[in-house]
Image (cartoon, grey):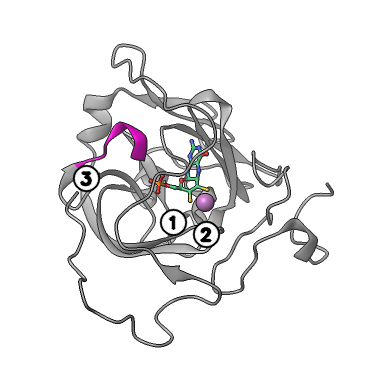
Amino acid sequence: MGLPDRTGERVAPGRLPPGQREQRGWPVTHYGPVPRFRPERWDFRVFGATADSVGHSWDLSRFSALPYATVIADLHCVTRFSMLDAEWGGVRTRTVLEAAPPAAGVTHVMVWAEFGYSANIRLADFAAENAVFATHCGGEALTAEHGFPVRLVLPHLYAWKGPKWVRGVEYMTADRRGFWEERGYHNIGEVRAEQRHSYQEEPGDGPEL
Ligand SMILES: Nc1nc2c(c(=O)[nH]1)N[C@H]1C(S)=C(S)[C@@H](COP(=O)(O)O)O[C@H]1N2
Ligand SMILES: [Mo]
């Protein structure tokens, strides 16, 4: 689906983060079933410690009307496959932060998806310039198994930090572990630092397990 044609190309040395290999094509990896999209019930909510103390929500047409950006970004799975240079289209996390600003004390966010999947992310990581709530890849709408209608792409963190089927963002004034962060994966998950597993965590990297 609109992936760059890299047939016969070699990946330049140093292009891949440590311990990763390039995956041609786009595998599907997730825990649990693919949710059914119900447009009449779908919303994207921002809640928790918002600057104005109220929650914000968008239905899909209003969410899709937010400023659209395209970003070239990788997907790095902790199981070591990487998809390089995909073109993602959607709403930058910065746009969401501007539309529904966090309160002054917010340090982390929890990104929530269907079926209670969640990922905790430091606010500064979430606000990265190339972080996008993607609705499209390669110019085409996401397929159901790749996260339709919205998934988070946060290329400097391992891909478990990028939920598919996103439903909202919780602003938090303290860190709390998400789904995989409670189950053995690293609380921060930075790809270049190979922060794969919770046993690698240093004091201060996350709440006690
Ligand atoms: N909701 C949800 N999002 C998820 C996951 C999941 O289990 N549930 N798995 C993550 C992991 S570990 C990876 S590698 C990517 C895989 O995305 P893909 O299936 O589009 O390749 O989705 C991420 N987002
Ligand atoms: Mo993954």
Say which residue appears at 61% left-offset and 74% top-offset. Answer: 193
- How many other residues sit within 10 Å of disc 2, few (<14), some (14-19) or many (≥20)? some
Say which residue appears at 19% left-offset and 34% top-offset. Answer: 65
Residue 103: x percent and y percent?
A: 56, 42
Task: Report the amino acid beneath label 2.
Answer: Asp
What mark, if any, has residue 125 been given in the picture? Answer: 2
Q: Is residue 207 left or right of residue 148?
A: right
| Magenta residues, start to end | 141-146
Task: Report the amino acid beneath label 3.
Answer: Pro
Looking at the image, is 162 positioned above or below residue 201? Answer: above
Quarter assignment of residue 199: bottom right
Say which residue appears at 27% left-offset and 60% top-offset. Answer: 86
Quarter assignment of residue 31: top right
Task: Report the amino acid beneath label 1.
Answer: Leu
Callout 1: SS: loop
Residue on which the image places disc 3: 67
**Foreground pick, 3 / 23:** 23
- How many other residues sit within 10 Å of disc 3, few (<14), some (14-19) or many (≥20)? few
Q: Is residue 57 left or right of residue 3?
A: right
Residue, far top = 40
Residue on which the image places disc 1: 154
Distance of mark 1 from mark 2, alpha carbons? 8 Å
In magenta stretch: residue 170 = no
Q: Is residue 112 left or right of residue 177?
A: left
Callout 2: SS: helix
Give the number of the mark in front: 3 or 1. Answer: 1
Q: Is residue 81 left or right of residue 6?
A: right
